[in-house]
Image: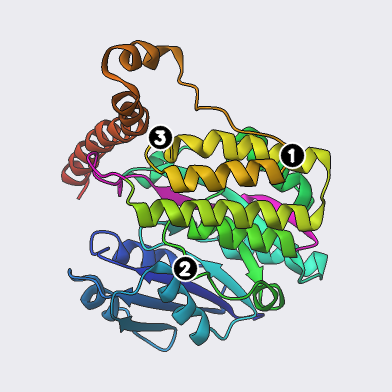
Amino acid sequence: MGELVSVLVPAFNAEKWIGQCIESVLNQTWPECELIVVDDGSSDRTYEIARKFQSGRVKVVSQNNMGASVARNKALSLAQGEFIQWLDADDLLAADKISRQLRHAKDIKDPSVLLSSSFGSFYFRVHKARFTPTSLWNDMSPVEWFITRFNDRVWMNPAVWLVSRRLTEQIGPWDERLTLNDDGEYFARAVAACRGIKFVPEARCYYRQANADSLSKTYSHEALESLFLSLKLCYGYLLQREDSGRTRAAALGHLQNCLIFFYPEEKEILARADDLAKDLGGCLTAPRLSSKYLLVKKLFGWTTSKRLVLTVPKLKKRVFGTYDKIMSELEIRTNP
């Protein structure tokens, strides 16, 4: 027996995945876990399926569709645990993920240390998940984590983090203004507030890639406003920890890499991005395309080439996801 861990799951139209997600929480080897699922006004059977798991350990509530950040704050308001585990409704935890991290927490005895873990990407077959280490898969100071993330353009799945109650209260609620990169901003705030990051490689979680956006979907103006605000906030968190040449250069380089999302249509955001770059001590240039897209740009223009840059990764996911789904169904038929 030990500290209670609250696993918090916001869910929206996740009927395909929510059952497996919940089971991964109920299968945790750490005995003291509570699960709180907040259905954010789903139009499918997400709430109905989640309610089947309701028990003394599992609480399922619903709200009108108000966005992921609002749903997460609702879940957090109901949490009783000394540690908080965030989990998206289509992702999974290895059975010993929480146990392995808490063993290190007991040795460290410092609630201001943020615990992270490894994560594997998969489509439908969990046993085919690929665990590909990045430069963030290490013990790090907050400033080094930010610089590495910005310079190497790497990320961590939100499920890797296990956050103490004390640190959670210090971080504050999710920013309900944000609709895109809300998790990036929240965990950047967590990193900025912590004393250090303890990476636990043997602890694992799973990031599902099958739930990809439509290939034809474009980012709305609202979503891009959210992205720019979250980036600006993240850079500010880093500079609050260390305002130096290397931190400003890392933030400026990251902003330059993200410019393609706004260029050339979002002129107001681009003007603000230019101002932000000046504040960071530099300037921005037009996004550069890799050589394979230069001919497309020459023949069809920037807009078409940009659409390809943003669509090709989704297309690859669609192809690999379709293949993995077929193989998953074949395995189920072969070994029901």
Q: Are circles 3 and 2 on residues that touch, CB within 8 Å?
A: no
Badge 3 marks a residue whose secondary structure is: loop
Residue farthest along the bottom direction in this orientation: 56
In magenta stretch: residue 105: no
Q: Quadrant of residue 51?
A: bottom left
Give the alpha-carbon distance from disc 1 to disc 3, as whole Å. 22 Å
Residue that carries the numbered disc 2 in the rendered image: 177
- What is the secondary structure assignment of the residue under circle 2? loop
Tell which circle, 1 or 3, labels the residue nearer the N-terminal end: 3
The spot of residue 299 in percent (x, y) is: 28, 12
300 relative to 278, above or below: above
Q: Is residue 202 magenta?
A: yes
Residue 53 quadrant: bottom left
Marks 2 and 1: which is nearer the front? 1
Q: In the rendering, at what x and y percent does residue 229 appear? A: 53, 56
- Pointer 1 residue: 281
Judge the density around disc 3: few (<14), some (14-19), many (≥20) Cα neighbours within 10 Å.
some
In what element is the residue under mark 1? loop
Kind of residue sitting beneath label 2: Arg
Work out how far the residue at label 2 is from the one at label 1, CA to CA, in angstroms: 27 Å
Q: Earlier in the sequence, mark 2 or mark 1?
A: 2
The residue sitting at 31% across, 31% down in the picture is 307
> In the image, what residue type sits under mark 1?
Gly
Q: Magenta region: which residues?
A: 194-218
Q: Position of residue 216 (x, y in %)?
A: 22, 40
In the rendered image, the vertical position of residue 294 relative to residue 102, given as above or below: above
Nearer the N terminus, badge 3 or badge 2? 2
Label 2: few (<14), some or many (≥20) within 10 Å? some
Please state the horizontal and vertical placement of residue 220, each as a whole percent of the image: 32, 51
Where is mark 3, residue-wise?
264
The N terminus: image quadrant = bottom right
